[in-house]
Image: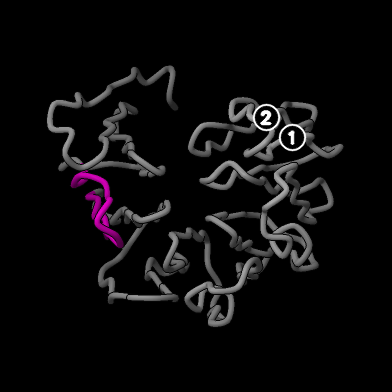
Amino acid sequence: VSLGSTGACAVAIDGSVACWGASDGSWYGLEPVPEGPFLDVEVSSSDDYACGIKLDRSIECWSSYSSVDPEVLSDMPEGEFHKLALQGGRACALDGDGMAGCWGAGGSYGILSNVPSTAFVSISLSELRACGLRPDGQLECWGRDVEATEGLWAGVSGSYNELCFLERSGSVQCNRTEELHLTPAPSGTFSAVDVGLFGGCVKDSDGYLQCWGPLGVEDMPQVEKPLEKWE
């Protein structure tokens, strides 16, 4: 399953994709969904398009929103791919060797033109930069306002204005890129992190979630869900 700001898409057991939410056809573009089967699907944070990895590992992107950037729907790289990352009018995918291919609209702050020739195990995008996690646990980031990120890492998750990094030790650090950003991530030891447009969640070693919201919402409670629902 992949979430945008108000819409989502998921891959069924038979490989078909269903999308819901974001139902205002004058703005959003998650439907109609092309014929599958698909192995994976990702939704842009703005809900105006989605991309999926098909059974032959090729990429297909779709949108019914008339103002979506045409490049993101037509300039997908050729080959066999295993992971996708979407943000705004840009997208990246990792092939079977972990090499990244990125495509989409211009004005990309170097995200499209400065892709490293490095193998990654995962990749994530924010509006201003992209970061890939190498097999040795090192992070390599490119784009605008890139800061050195030292240490050994287990994961990275990005949204419009935020990148959050999971250290191999289990702690989480978040890198803000705009005035509108997430509150500091919870302290503790975690096994996974995921951030969206206005919030983020981490999962601890017992399988419980802690979630946090926008800066300035001081009374927003953390949300915990039991292990059997979130493994």
Above or below residue 58? Residue 95 is below
Q: Which of 47 and 173 is in front in this view?
A: 47
Magenta stretch mostly in which secondary structure?
loop
Q: Tell me which amino acid carries mark 1.
A: Glu
Which residue: 63% across, 67% down? 105
Residue 43 picture location, percent across and down:
60, 43
The image quadrant that residue 198 belongs to is top left
Mark 1: few/some/many CA within 10 Å (<14, 14-19, 20+): many
Count of marks, rendered view:
2
Q: Which of 123 and 64 is in front in this view?
A: 64
In the image, taking residue 151 as reference, residue 83 lies left or right, namely right
Residue 203 picture location, percent across and down:
33, 35
Which residue: 57% across, 54% down? 86
In the rendered structure, does residue 40 fall within the stretch colored magenta? Answer: no
The image quadrant that residue 227 belongs to is top left
SS category of the residue bearing label 1: loop
In the image, taking residue 197 as reference, residue 53 lies left or right, namely right
The furthest residue to the right: 35
The image quadrant that residue 70 belongs to is bottom right
Question: Which quadrant would the N terminus be assigned to in this image?
Answer: top right
SS category of the residue bearing label 2: strand
Which residue: 63% across, 63% down? 94
Which residue: 79% across, 34% down? 32
For marks 2 and 1, the one nearer the N-term is: 2
| Residue with the mark numbered 2 | 19
In the image, taking residue 108 as reference, residue 68 lies left or right, namely right
| Residue with the mark numbered 1 | 31
* Inter-mark Cα distance, 2 to 1: 7 Å
Residue 161 picture location, percent across and down:
36, 56
Q: Give the range drawn in magenta.
A: 171-185
Q: What's the coloring here?
A: one colour
Q: Are marks 2 and 1 in contact (CB under 8 Å)?
A: yes
